[in-house]
Amino acid sequence: MTLSWLQRVVGADRREAWGEYARESILDANDGIVTAAGLAEGLAAGGASTGTLLLAGAAVIVAGGLAAAGARYTEERTEWEMDRRLLEAERASIEADPEAEFDELVGIYETKGLSADLARQVAEALTEHDPIAAHADAELHLDSAASPLTSLHAALIAGLSFALGALVPLAVVSATPVGPRVELTIVAVLLALALTGWFTSWLTGLSPFRVLRRNLVLGAATLAAGLVIGLVSGA
């Protein structure tokens, strides 16, 4: 029985980091698509020139991307700091009474379905390797190896995802002729939201119909609001 095998067993239910980042990235991309689409449709319906659309689009990409990155950094950093506080408290408990903490770890593995002997073997192997990491995983469900760079990484992904999503409606509305500009942008936005909805359902296992319906209804509502404002202001 090797340590790597034990780590795979006790950590089998841990959510994969890439899947979490992918889901969050899709949400940020959706925000970018919907935000930029509402603005672009409103300006286009109001008769704005291509230059105005490009300027407004650049502002949305920069400001929206930075806002998404800042929000995600704050969220991730706060969570990381809270996790560090829990880990420090666990470290103090282990230093104060290591035997009691070891027995607690054994009990945790017994509740997972391991026999008393096997639970003790698992606890001994993991404690010998890294007692803090053992308790972080089994008791606190935390990653003791996480670093502040994770917050920066998440912020960068959020900002880029928003910007890439915003590029879809802005590219279409800026590149198409004035006549069919509004209609083509609506089609492009709904197709983009359908694509992100399908990918979300694939990642999460949720019903594709429900995810697509939610994306398309919210996107259509945003487009309608932008069109109404643009038509009223341009009348």
Image (cartoon, grey):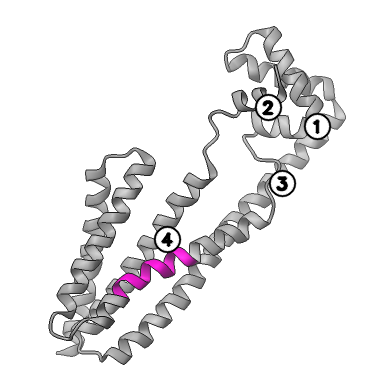
Viewer-nearest of discs 4 and 2: 2
Q: Is residue 203 above or below residue 129?
A: below
Callout 2: few (<14), some (14-19), or many (20+) C-alpha neighbours within 10 Å?
few
Query: Does dot 3 land on a helix, a strand or a loop?
Result: helix
| Left or right: 131 as drawn, with respect to 38 | right
Using residue 19 as the reference point, say whether residue 84 is left or right of it.
right
Closer to us: mark 3 or mark 1?
Answer: 3
What is the C-alpha distance between the residues marked 2 and 1?
A: 26 Å
Residue 48 horizontal/vertical position (percent) = 24, 90
Q: Residue at x 22, y 57 (%)?
A: 216
Q: Residue 235: image x %, image y %?
A: 14, 90
Q: Upstream in the sequence, badge 2 or badge 3?
A: 2
Q: Does residue 139 show up?
A: no
For the residues labelled 1 and 4, say whether their Cβ atoms are less than 8 Å apart: no
Q: Residue at x 51, y 47 (%)?
A: 18
Q: Earlier in the sequence, mark 3 or mark 1?
A: 3
Q: Which residue is mark 3?
A: 84
**Residue at numbered disc 2:** 4
| Residue underneath mark 4 | 28
Please give the range of residues in magenta. Answer: 160-170
Q: Quadrant of the N terminus?
A: top right
